[in-house]
Amino acid sequence: MDAVPAAIAEALRRATDTGGHICVLTGAGMSAESGIPTFRGTHDSLWSRFDPMRLATAEAWREDPALVWGWYRWRMQLVRDAQPNAGHRALATLAQRVPLSLVTQNVDDLHERAGSLVDAHVHGSLFALRCFACGRAHAGSLDDYVGGMQRVEPMRCAACGDRIRPGVVWFGEALPDDAWSAATDAAMRCTLMLVVGTSGLVYPAAGLPALARRHGATVVEINPEPTALSAEVDHVWRATAAHGLPRFLG
Ligand code: BJW
Ligand code: ZN
């Protein structure tokens, strides 16, 4: 098994020994080894089979809510059946040893189920259902809405009668203020940022590593493939999340 590359181990040692703060930014690759497909790039990525512009936008929802809701129900079922992997568990353990902020683009709950406190879900959470029109939170049992992928008419809001939508951030929508402000605070405060399993294509989240660097942090990418961020980081480790992150525990 390969150990953490020396320059990265040294960056971690420097950050932790000198009272520094680590910020971890995760993307879909974090959950890939739990069996959740990523969005882009692989033959089984979510969007190699579905057109994101048809499914992950408010326009798509208005046009065909049953199609979009069916896709999300299927994804909720996938997440519910998945388990956190060794990478999720390693981050939860690391946070008990060093000051660490966890910022995720993922809409799953695998970090939490591994024992982490997530500082910011910048793209929301699959299970935080709310009304499309009035925004009121919908509290229902999971069994009411998980399922296989077929067209399903969404549930209705008890307050206004409009449709209940997943609590995610679609293209063209603003990121939740509290999550975005926690994410930028963590990026500006950290001395080391670990960027795990993201293609770095979706903004504004993809701008967090550059923000951290401008504020003096060392930025490390952990990803088996090159990404849009690779050229902008200080160190790159071509490893998967479940392989690489446990190695940070020594
Ligand atoms: C492994 C691995 C293993 C594989 N281990 N790694 C600036 C410039 C250009 C465009 C824009 C810009 N600012 C805004 C935009 C527009 C747009 C955007 O960025 N478009 C680009 C695509 C061009 N952004 C937005 O619209 C955002 N909103 C916004 O800016 O609002 C402005 C506004 C302000 C005020 C009022 C109104 C509006 C919103 C973005 C929302 C993104 N939402 C999604 C869907 C969420 C819902 C859902 O899940 O269905 O979030 S898109 C999708 O991409 C999802 C992800 O969180 C996000 C990022 O993807 P991620 O995590 O990087 O995954 P992948 O698949 O791309 O990459 C996986 C990586 O894992 C790969 O690198 C693999 O190699 C790696 N990997 N196995 C480790 N085992
Ligand atoms: Zn409503």
Image (cartoon, helix red, strand yellow):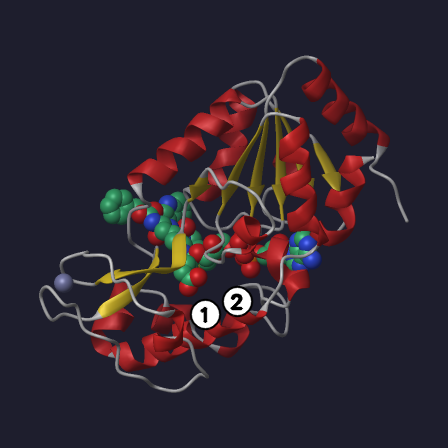
Residue drawn at (30%, 54%) of the image: 172
Q: Amino acid at mark 2?
A: Val
On the image, which quarter does residue 166 sit in? bottom left
Considering the image in quadrants, where does the C terminus appear? Answer: top right
Q: Amino acid at mark 1?
A: Met
Residue drawn at (24%, 75%) of the image: 155
Please state the horizontal and vertical placement of residue 92, each as a whole percent of the image: 63, 41
At label 1, counting other C-alpha atoms closer than 10 Å, the crowd grade (few under 14, some 14-19, many 20 or more) is many
Residue drawn at (31%, 44%) of the image: 176
Q: Is residue 52 left or right of residue 15?
A: left
Q: Which residue is mark 1?
A: 76
Query: Which secondary structure lies at badge 1?
Result: helix
Please state the horizontal and vertical placement of residue 56, each as a whole percent of the image: 36, 66
Please state the horizontal and vertical placement of residue 152, each as a whole percent of the image: 31, 84
Query: Which secondary structure lies at badge 2?
Result: helix
Residue drawn at (49%, 53%) of the image: 106
Q: Are marks 1 and 2 in contact (CB under 8 Å)?
A: yes
In the image, 108 versus 220, the foreground residue is 108
Taking 203 as reference, is 67 above or below it? Answer: below
Furthest residue toward front:
141
